Image: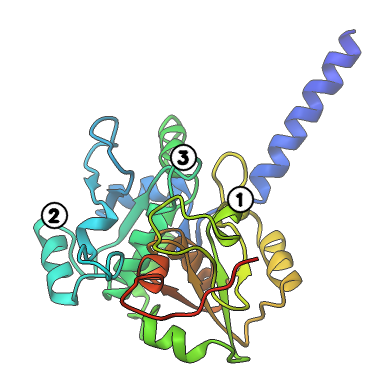
Amino acid sequence: MIRFAFFFTLLLLSHSLLASETRISGLKGWFVDASTSLYLSKQGAILIDAREGITLRSLPKSISLGWQEISRKDSPFVGNLLPDSEAKAVLAKKGILPNTILLVYGDPTGGWGEEGRIVWSLRTLGFSKSFIIDGGYAALKKASNSSVPDRSDILAKIRNSSSEQKKWDVDRNFVSAKLGDKNTVFIDTREEREYLGETPYGESKGGHLPKAKWIYYRNFLDKEGFLLPDSKILAKLHELGISKDKTVVSYCTGGVRSGWMTSVLASLGYDAKNYAGSMWEWTSPKFDNPLVLK
């Protein structure tokens, strides 16, 4: 019995070590681990809480920012970003300024990928030193119980990085023009039932874009809300024929889940874009856009 308990404990320990070895350590594209985030915050980086409806339990000195605060609310353009000047004015009032290191956390297992939407929004607006904290709020709380490592190397790397000269968003006209284009791939990041035609979140009509690939965004997270290893993500993308020589446009209902997916794809080196208007805009009665039911 003692021997069984010993081997069972060893098995659990090895599993835990294996999981931790495959998680992000330090900086990886648009993602950063929790321990490094705590070090960066001590050096002046701003923590941003992207969780919806949270009034308590935010980490000290965090700034609350909902994705809707910098998004349009007028139909049929709900989900699209506000014009640059308006969005930047909202951010400035909160103390969020360009050239500041911004670390965004959410609730990966219970949310909608809001942290990814906000980082995508910030980078689209020119805030290129914006990052998603892998594992979200829970990972930060756990990391805060341990000593904070010295990550001055990562701090220097971020501070010395040049501004991005890249466009991370596309509009309805772009999507319409690229349907059927062999160099463009569309990913539907919604639940499978939505892809197949159900409309639980307010779309005017059901269906998906013609020839769109389906990858539910949470399929790239483990059960604790950490990003899967590159090998697993790349294997799934390869399986669906999604290669780095294509422009990859993600969409969902209102650009939140697809914003998270765009953050992942950009971190892996894909030419990734988010269609922020997504199905709220695409299915509007004001437009006659094609849809496929399957």
Query: Looking at the picture, which amino acid does disc 2 mark?
Result: Lys
Percent of width and height locating residue 178:
51, 89
Residue labelled with disc 1: 23
Give the class, few, some or many, for how many residues have Cα within 10 Å of label 3's Cα (few <14, many ≥20): few
Percent of width and height locating residue 203:
40, 60
| N-term-proximal mark, 2 vs 3 | 2
Instruction: Locate residue 171 relative to residue 227 in the image: left or right.
Output: left
Does residue 131 lie above or below 286 as drawn?
above
Q: Nearer the viewer, residue 154 or 229?
A: 229
Percent of width and height locating residue 161:
37, 76
Indicate the secondary structure of the residue bearing disc 2.
Answer: loop
Give the class, few, some or many, for how many residues have Cα within 10 Å of label 2's Cα (few <14, many ≥20): few
Indicate the secondary structure of the residue bearing disc 1.
Answer: loop
Give the quadrant of the C terminus: bottom right
Q: How far is mark 2 from mark 1, CA to CA?
A: 32 Å
Residue labelled with disc 2: 94
Residue labelled with disc 3: 110
Q: Is residue 26 visible?
A: yes
Residue at 45%, 46% in the rendered image? 34
Which numbered disc, 2 or 3, marks the residue closer to the eye? Answer: 3
Query: Looking at the picture, which amino acid does disc 3 mark?
Result: Gly
